[in-house]
Amino acid sequence: MEREENVRDVFHVPPGRRPPPEILLLDDVYTSGATARACARALKTAGAGHIVVLTVARTVL
């Protein structure tokens, strides 16, 4: 939950910009997924269609 709060409202698409309908979102390390979710949420809010998240490594908690 703390990780979610740390990235809440951090990511945004600038006004007047519209993301492409299909996006490959790259994240270097997946720990809780909070960063990827926050990024995807911002992109979806701005009008993105299909988003695929790819991570390079995963942290085991």
Image (cartoon, rainbow, N blue to C red):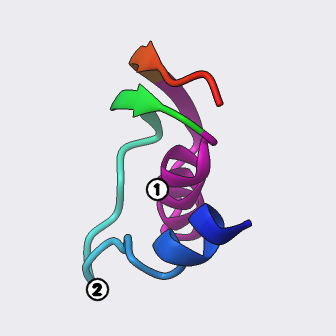
Q: Which of the image's four quarters has the N terminus?
A: bottom right
Magenta range is 32-53
For mark 2, give the secondary structure. loop
> Residue 55: percent from the left, percent from the top?
42, 20
Q: Is residue 55 visible?
A: yes
Residue lying at 25% horizontally and 79% vertically, measured from the top left: 14
Residue lying at 38% horizontally and 70% vertically, measured from the top left: 11
Q: Mark 2 and mark 1: span between their CA atoms?
A: 16 Å
Q: Which of the image's four quarters has the C terminus?
A: top right
- The mark found on residue 39 in the picture is 1
Task: Give the image quarter of residue 17.
Answer: bottom left
Please rate how many residues cluster around mark 1, counting C-alpha atoms within 10 Å: few if below 14, some from 14 to 19, many from 20: many
- The mark found on residue 15 in the picture is 2
Tag 1: amino acid: Cys
Give the number of the mark in front: 2 or 1: 1
> Residue 23: percent from the left, percent from the top?
41, 33
1 relative to 21 in the view: left or right: right
Work out which residue is located at the far right of the displayed protein and give it: 1
Tell which circle, 2 or 1, labels the residue nearer the N-terminal end. 2
Please rate how many residues cluster around mark 2, counting C-alpha atoms within 10 Å: few if below 14, some from 14 to 19, many from 20: few
- Of 18 and 3, the residue lying toward us: 3
Say if the magenta span includes residue 17. Answer: no
Task: Give the image quarter of residue 51.
Answer: top right
> Residue 35: percent from the left, percent from the top?
48, 52
